[in-house]
């Protein structure tokens, strides 16, 4: 099929999908006029959009798709000025008592991406009360600013530059008891990765509010064009930053040029901008002075500010003339001064960090050698805000949002589920480790009006210990994934149409009643799927020749396995250098090469395995290893994030596990406080066996690890203990179980459980393969051993009985007194290196 025909076919596919898709599946996102732009007019009717003429047509949309809280209202006369921007004509307000939090969720965004977030407010006496409110604004789980409305006609603008740790950004309004929070508009603009690098996941930049009565807008980002050019934004600034004219100063004059200013030396602009084609200079003087006062709405006693000064020479300076000046902050030598000469039509950026609250002064002072006065083209002033609150871990947060949407739950379920603690969602218990994100350990949804089936999102709450779904109208079977969460206790009583796996008669009746609905839904989805598959095959056949080396090596994978490296991210060698800070920290080394610690854009740690020049592993071996990893997916096997084949450079990128490997835990010296219990040791063995069982039984053809050893079993950071295990064969023959058990456990284990594992280990060491147990047998034996130990620990075990308890999740009725623990048992997550991968002798924590 010709390329033009393929494109036409793809268009048809898209049209068909649009026709068959269910309207309930539609998701409302912001207008993407420029890639990633989200422009929201708060309070306008759902579904309404309009082009904003002040920004050359950026389209604003209703906020109905970004929040389901609050009410809309229009500003009242005389504040409905026909000349003001449309987004100031309506508001969304959020009534409620003190402490109530109401949030907007902006998506899609890229985790680890840097964004400008802007909130706008115009009271306009929308409620007819003439009561000016004061409330807080937060960005995610961290406080952004206090919004203090001082006039009904004043328009307030607050901006922040922040890094998003998740695939969404949340902006929340918090009632502080001083009036009803409201908002007029929200903007989100993606920034380049090289811009404003002072903004990280740990701190954001807040555009400092202005403290001069003559200000038209309340922010500190200035350009110096003549008065007719009061405000520059999109499209003159491709990132839609608002550049306000500084104002008229009698001692200053403007110089301008019609020529473009080169911006290749600065990161704030990626193409010439008229913003830098004007500058201010003193009329009859040798210095430029300006100051600012810290904003109490944003700052604290230990305030830090980021000052950005932009310079570009706009006049041709004769050879016998010199424009040179010092940049002095607060007249103090401690803040430093620097002689500076701007370059002709070439922009330069000077940054200063300024400490302390109160008033600050910046002076541009001509040097004694200068014959021309100083100039200044533009400036920005930010308050640096530390992000001290830690959000709920991403997986738990996403799961809770899915549950909230699935069951249309309101409660106080806005913003982050666990953080800050004062705003945690009703019905949740959260665990807050000393470092890292919070985890959800208990969820109580009794009598919450839940209908339908039990959603799969519950299974994504990996630290959940207690789940109460009783007294609702749930139907269908209890999902198997609940039984696969060993530490979970769940209540499901008084759900008349809910059935377990042992009694499916009720479920069968429900299936029959829903069969028509299922067919009606499945047919259009199946049609759309077939069309997409056809389009994919056509486009794939047109693939660029640069990837042919992959196809040529496809024989390395089995005929029954079509997965390949393209399922994972492809890195360039340059990206790997950035990720690893130029390969600064080596954490291991093996036959393939060195392993380095790195960090992705969202600050997630990774292990980068670089093939050395002396490695015996060639292209085929490299491809074989990568293809093995891409087609093997199991919770107990190491997972591959991506790969690099950039000319002569080859590398694999794995998840990084901070807990190290089992060998370090077993051979290190550990205090009693960090000793591995027998229960934890059994769990590690069981998880490792399950990984091997998957390789042996679930892979086609089966994969044999061939290098199973403690060095290749990786642990999560939650596992804090070590064990010495020497002379097992010799001591077992003596028949004394205590002689091989770690004395530091002080006998706190079930003897039969230890014997069972010891005997199993000996069987696995038998030389004839027929006498060794299969991995299925190993898993079964380890589960029985774990059952024995749990029974022993609970006080239920007796040496005269052979019965064991079931470790699967226990379902109890409403009379149960089971309660969740505030501190869930830390679950070890060992990982096994895949067959064909060279093991690495590590120096630091193990890659994952």
Image (tube, rainbow, N blue to C red):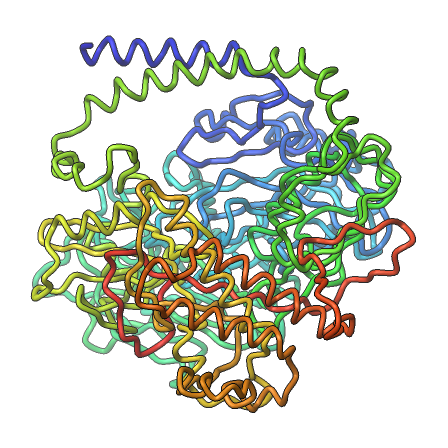
- Quarter of the picture containing the N terminus is top left
Quarter-of-image position of residue 330: bottom left
Where is residue 534 drawn, in percent x and y?
A: 33, 15
Which residue is found at the position 13% from the left and 55% from the top?
649
Where is residue 727 drawn, in percent x and y?
A: 40, 87
Looking at the image, residue 592 sits to the left or right of residue 326; the answer is: left
Quarter-of-image position of residue 568: top left
Which residue is found at the position 31% from the left and 69% from the top?
286
Where is residue 320 drawn, in percent x and y?
A: 9, 65
Q: Nearer the viewer, residue 531 or 50?
A: 531
Q: Nearer the viewer, residue 592 or 499?
A: 499
Which residue is found at the position 22% from the left and 40% from the top?
557
Determine whether 831 is above or below 416 in the image: below
- Quarter of the picture containing the C terminus is bottom left
Q: Can residue 597 be seen?
A: yes
Looking at the image, residue 767 sits to the left or right of residue 35; the answer is: left
Q: Report the residue that reaches farthest toward the right.
A: 815
Where is residue 667 drawn, in percent x and y?
A: 41, 85
Q: Nearer the viewer, residue 640 or 181?
A: 640
Which residue is found at the position 57% from the left and 67% from the top?
293
């Amino acid at each position: 099929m010709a390329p033009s025909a393929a494109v036409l076919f793809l268009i048809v596919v898209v049209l068909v999908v649009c026709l068959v898709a269910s309207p309930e599946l539609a998701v409302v996102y912001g207008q993407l006029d420029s890639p990633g732009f989200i422009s929201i007019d708060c309070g306008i009717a759902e579904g309404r959009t309009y082009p904003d003429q002040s920004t050359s047509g950026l389209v604003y949309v209703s906020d109905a798709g970004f929040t389901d809280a609050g009410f809309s209202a229009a500003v009242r006369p005389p504040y409905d000025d026909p000349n003001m921007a449309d987004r100031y004509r309506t508001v969304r307000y959020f009534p409620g008592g003190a402490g109530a939090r109401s949030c907007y969720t902006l998506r899609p965004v890229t985790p680890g991406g840097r964004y400008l977030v802007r909130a706008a407010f115009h009271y306009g006496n929308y409620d007819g009360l003439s009561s000016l409110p004061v409330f807080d604004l937060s960005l995610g789980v961290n406080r952004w600013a206090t919004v203090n409305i001082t006039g009904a006609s004043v328009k307030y603008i607050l901006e922040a530059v922040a890094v998003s740790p998740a695939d969404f950004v949340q902006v929340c309004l918090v009632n502080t008891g001083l009036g009803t929070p409201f908002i007029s508009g929200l903007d989100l603009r993606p920034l380049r990765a090289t811009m404003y690098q002072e903004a990280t996941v740990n701190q954001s930049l807040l555009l400092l509010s202005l403290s001069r009565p003559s200000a038209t807008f309340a922010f500190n980002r200035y350009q110096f064009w003549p008065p007719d050019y009061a405000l520059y934004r999109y499209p003159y600034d491709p990132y839609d930053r608002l550049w306000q004219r500084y104002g008229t100063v009698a001692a200053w004059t403007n110089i301008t040029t019609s020529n473009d200013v080169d911006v290749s030396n600065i990161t704030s602009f990626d193409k010439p901008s008229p913003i830098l084609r004007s500058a201010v200079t003193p009329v009859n003087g040798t210095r430029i002075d300006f100051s600012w006062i810290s904003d109490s709405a944003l700052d604290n006693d230990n305030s830090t500010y980021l000052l950005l000064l932009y310079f570009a020479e706009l006049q041709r300076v004769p050879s016998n003339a010199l424009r040179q000046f010092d940049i002095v902050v607060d007249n103090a030598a401690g803040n430093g001064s620097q002689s500076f000469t701007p370059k002709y039509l070439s922009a330069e950026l000077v940054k200063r960090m300024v400490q302390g609250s109160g008033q600050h002064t910046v002076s541009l002072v001509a040097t004694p050698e200068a014959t021309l006065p100083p100039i200044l083209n533009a400036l920005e002033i930010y308050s640096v805000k530390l992000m001290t609150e830690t959000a709920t871990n991403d997986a738990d947060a996403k799961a809770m949002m899915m549950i909230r949407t699935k069951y249309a739950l309101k409660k106080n379920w806005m913003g982050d589920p666990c953080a800050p603690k004062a705003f945690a969602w009703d019905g949740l218990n959260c665990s807050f480790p000393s470092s890292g994100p919070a985890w959800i350990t208990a969820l109580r949804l009794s009598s919450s009006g839940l209908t339908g089936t039990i959603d799969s999102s519950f299974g994504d709450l990996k630290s959940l210990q207690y789940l109460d779904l009783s007294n609702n109208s749930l139907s269908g079977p209890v999902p198997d994934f609940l039984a696969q969460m060993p530490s979970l206790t769940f209540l499901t009583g008084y759900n008349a149409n809910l059935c377990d796996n042992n009694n499916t008669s009720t479920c069968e009746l429900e299936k029959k009643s829903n069969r028509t609905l299922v067919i009606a839904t499945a047919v259009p989805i199946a049609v759309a799927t077939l069309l997409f598959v056809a389009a994919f095959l056509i486009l794939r056949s047109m693939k660029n020749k640069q990837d042919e080396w992959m196809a040529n090596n496809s024989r390395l994978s089995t005929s029954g396995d079509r997965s390949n490296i393209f399922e994972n991210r492809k890195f360039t060698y340059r990206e790997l250098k950035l990720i690893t800070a130029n390969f600064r920290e080596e954490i291991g080394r093996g036959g393939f090469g060195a392993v380095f610690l790195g960090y992705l854009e969202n600050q997630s740690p990774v292990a980068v395995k670089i093939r050395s020049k002396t490695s015996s592993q060639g292209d085929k071996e490299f491809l074989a290893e990568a293809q093995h990893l891409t087609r093997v997916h199991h919770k107990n096997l190491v997972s591959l994030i991506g790969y690099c084949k950039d000319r002569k450079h080859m590398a694999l990128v794995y998840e990084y596990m901070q807990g190290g490997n089992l060998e370090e835990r077993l051979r290190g010296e550990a205090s009693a406080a960090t000793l591995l219990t027998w229960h934890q040791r059994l769990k590690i063995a069981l998880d490792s066996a399950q990984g091997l069982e998957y390789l042996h039984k679930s892979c086609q053809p089966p994969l044999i690890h061939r290098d199973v050893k403690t060095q290749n079993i990786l642990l999560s950071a939650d596992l804090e203990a070590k064990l010495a295990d020497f002379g097992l064969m010799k001591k077992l023959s003596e028949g004394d179980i205590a002689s091989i058990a770690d004395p530091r456990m002080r006998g706190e284990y079930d003897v039969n459980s230890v014997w069972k594992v010891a005997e199993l280990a000996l069987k696995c060491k038998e030389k004839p393969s027929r006498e060794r147990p299969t991995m299925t047998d190993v898993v079964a034996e380890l589960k029985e051993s774990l059952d024995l130990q749990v029974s022993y620990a609970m006080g239920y075990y007796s040496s005269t009985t052979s019965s064991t308890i079931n470790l699967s999740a226990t379902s109890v009725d409403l009379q149960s007194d089971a309660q969740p623990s505030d501190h869930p048992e830390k679950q070890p997550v060992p990982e096994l290196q895949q067959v064909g991968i060279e093991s690495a002798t590590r120096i630091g924590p193990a890659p994952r």
